[in-house]
Image: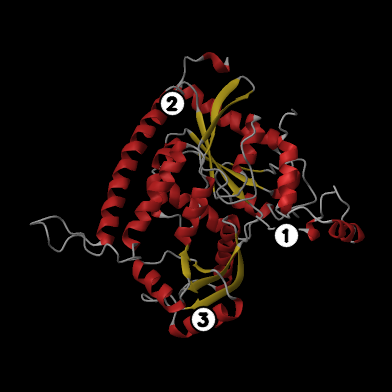
Amino acid sequence: MSSWNPNKQGKFRNSLDGSSPKIGEVAAQKADGGVSGRRPTPQQRNTFSTAVEPERAILVSVCPAGQTVERTEEYLAELEFLLRTAGGIALKKVIQRLERPDTRTYVGSGKLEEIKEYIQALEPDLVVVDDELSPAQLRNLEKELSLRILDRTTLILDIFARHARTATARTQVELAQLQYMLPRLTRLWTHLERQRGGIGMRGPGETQIETDRRLIKEKISALKIQLAKLDTQKTLQRKNRESLVRVALVGYTNVGKSTLLNLLAKSDVLAENKLFATLDTTVRKVVIGNLPFLLSDTVGFIRKLPTQLVESFKSTLDEVAEADLLLHVVDLSHPDHQSQIDAVNKTLADIGAADKPVIMVYNKIDRVNEESKTENDAMLDSDSPLSTLHSSLSTPHIFISAALRTNIDALRDLLYDHIARIHAIRYPYNNFLY
């Protein structure tokens, strides 16, 4: 008796249930170009795309008194860059001139009707506001527009959550999100409107929103304890590095700090043309001549950086607060780089690092002056657009292009001079320099 063959059994079963094509159907397939045994083309079979469709948004901003429309448009361009980093696209930008944002709906009633018309015509997925909304403003806008509303803080927190990789970064971002969410909880369901106990325990109970608040507060407490443990580990790591001078890269987000770190330390840290591509502090040992030092890359700053993030990332920003020298990297090609410098200086003051020695590193000069890219002095001739800036600066500074490796040797020499001076004062009996 022959053994049972599962393959034959499967074919026989298929022929019984009528799933196999008949002779006429095979002939029709061959006539249509679908040869038997050949995989059908995508047009011949039903296909489904798994690509995530980008969410479409309308951007809204208020131009307050004392601020020009051009400056507001630059801020909206930055908000659009934030939206693209988060995976969305902007359909329309709406600006309204007001003395100050409306306390109820952020914009006036007339502009609110105009936004409603844009929503009906463009059918966006959400509306993004270039300011932090109060809980009342957020609630009123959602009620008026019947659409999901995001403010600038929520968008930045979402980008941070996307880019967090290590346990420390994920804990910091989650803590910031919960602290921001706590005063903005809304009642999303009523099935647990009153929680009743057993016999003798019937009473007003606890509403669902109160339950949510209590759970979030407990989670925040747990995250703070976890973050304190991680902070202790980071502190011990920093103590092990006290024999070397520490230099920290600071600056606005997406100015080229990670690219410069890779260039000086010969590392491969992620460097992308995105906002907040780097969240975790990266420390690398660099040796220039006979002088070793530690170079750290920290999270980039931004205008209107959420307070919750500054508080949550205190342990990460301690690397900046405890550094001996700061390299303030500036995107010189940005049309409003001075306001970016002011935003960074404000954040440095908030974390207690405003009095640190600073070297201003003006990056991306290849986008400003295309003619001279070899020597620093050649770029600062009388016809150069950098000559006026050079003459007005009193702090140590240098103009470079990290992407094209322009003036990197001059930057190394400048770093060596400053670090050797700090090293000789702090470690007078160390023989690194001799």
The residue that label 2 is drawn on is 237
Query: Relative to 170, does residue 179 appear above or below in the rendering?
Result: below
The residue that label 3 is drawn on is 116
Is 99 placed left or right of 331 in the picture?
Answer: left
Is 84 placed left or right of 62 in the picture?
Answer: right
Residue drawn at x 55%, y 78% is: 119
**What is the secondary structure assignment of the residue under circle 1?**
loop
The residue that label 1 is drawn on is 46
Dot 1 amino acid type: Asn
Q: Is the C-beta separation of discs 1 and 3 under 8 Å?
A: no
What x and y, as percent, mark residue 256?
A: 62, 45
Mark 3 to mark 2 CA distance (whole Å): 54 Å
**What is the secondary structure assignment of the residue under circle 3?**
helix
Q: Is residue 365 visible?
A: yes
- Of 34 and 149, which appears nearest the observer? 34
Mark 1 to mark 3 CA distance (whole Å): 38 Å
Q: Earlier in the sequence, mark 2 or mark 1?
A: 1
What x and y, as percent, mark residue 298?
A: 51, 40
